[in-house]
Image (cartoon, grey):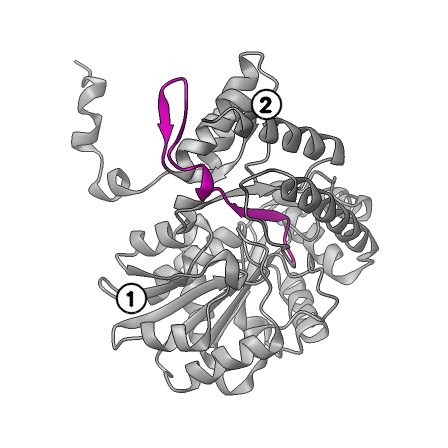
Amino acid sequence: MSTPATSTMNYLSERINQMQESATIKMAKMSRELKAQGKDIIDLSLGEPDFDTPQHIKDAAKEAIDKGYTKYTPVPGYPELRKAIAQKFKRDNNLDYSIEQIVVSTGAKQSIANVVMSLINPGDEVLLPAPYWVSYAAIAELAEGKCIEIPSTIDTNFKVTPDQLEKHITPKTKLIIFSSPCNPTGSVYSKTELSGIADVLKRHPNVFVLCDEIYEYINFTGEKHTSLAEFSDIKEQVITVNGFSKGFAMTGWRLGYIGAPLAIAKACDKMQGQITSGTCSIAQKAGEAALLTDITPSLKMVEQFKKRRDLVYALLKDIPGLKVNLPDGAFYFFFDVSSYFGKSYNGKTLNTPEDISLYLLSEGNIALVSGESFGDKTCLRMSYATSEEKLTEACKRMKAALAQLL
């Protein structure tokens, strides 16, 4: 006799029952369901470039199939790809890593999970400069770490200061996780700002930092990207995460990597060996081509992202009640909607970003993500990784829907 569905929660693990579903994936799922019902939804929830993978990268994958790269791969990745990643680190970031310090995974998300699972013991504190990407907290909690948020606001361009960081470090602090360029805010830490953070870390040699640099190439500052690991005094405390999804429009290829101190890289290799083993052989050969050949297509994508950013900034600034800043990288706006808290529609009062995101989905046919899952209680995240036509229409719908609130 089958167990009633209502009792499912009784036999699933406490670990999975307590885990939150990814807010971005949840909103994308709701958007797809509404589209299936015939509704004209503009989905700006997922951070996925609308560009196709550059042709020369696809050609390298086809060639790999023809050459028989269809077998199991080494757990940390093909040596050729790891060598290409080491060359990339040296070329773009002035970082020296041996291939033994590089582990290739099934997406940067798995890279992050490998690191966290390899470092965090129950009760260890994980500092999250907020807003932060939704999965950082979920992964840290899965490892039984304790997440400590370091708040920031739109008035500081969503950046935390060295003083803030220092005040949150305790004897229990084990790891700091942040991204630059940042998801969800688009903020980019300058070399001077990262130098200040490095100075703090020098005083706390037992604290590690996981730097998520997946948006490295999508940077509008005009300045060269700075990696925290470039500060030699703290390099052995830093794990750099990167991948191919954003800069090369390779989201579906699922290919990420780390450069890390050798002991941590070996631990991640060990962890991955028991979970997924080596990632897709074809994707790895495509990644090798992406790093070692022409990146002009990526640079052209970045030009389009900047053009879209400027368009959306002007459109959002024209919507009464929104508080908007100009992001320096990635492809998101993270704007403050708190002026609409307490307003209502059809008798329902909207008190949170989640309320407003659901209202905009039902009444404006736009899918955005609530800031609450990113560690913020005032904002919504909007991806502008889609066409100018869709972005213009989405902002038009948002303006009209918000104008209906009383």
Residue placed most toward the observer, 313 or 130: 313
Q: Secondary structure at mark 2?
A: loop
Residue 59, by quadrant, is top right
First in residue order: circle 1 vs circle 2: 2
At a point 29% along the width and 66% down the height, the residue shown is 125
At a point 47% along the width and 80% down the height, the residue shown is 236
At a point 50% along the width and 20% down the height, the residue shown is 33
> x%, y% of residue 140?
34, 56
Q: Which mark is residue 365?
A: none
Q: Is residue 309 left or right of residue 263?
A: right
> x%, y% of residue 310?
73, 48
Kind of residue indicated by mark 1: Glu
How far, Cα to Cα, is label 1 from label 2? 40 Å
Q: Is residue 5 above or below residue 368?
A: above
**336 in the magenta segment:** yes
> x%, y% of residue 99?
59, 71
Instruction: Decide if residue 224 is in sight here.
Output: yes
* Quadrant that contains the C terminus: top left
**73 in the magenta segment:** no
Residue placed most toward the observer, 309 or 293: 309
Q: Residues within 10 Å of mark 1 (few under 14, many from 20)?
A: many
Kindly identify which residue carries mark 2: 41
Q: Is residue 39 above or below residue 22?
A: above
Name the outermost residue toward the front.
406
Q: Are marks 1 and 2 in contact (CB under 8 Å)?
A: no
Residue placed most toward the observer, 8 or 305: 305
Q: Which mark is residue 125?
A: 1
Looking at the rendering, the stretch of residues picked out in magenta corresponds to 329-351
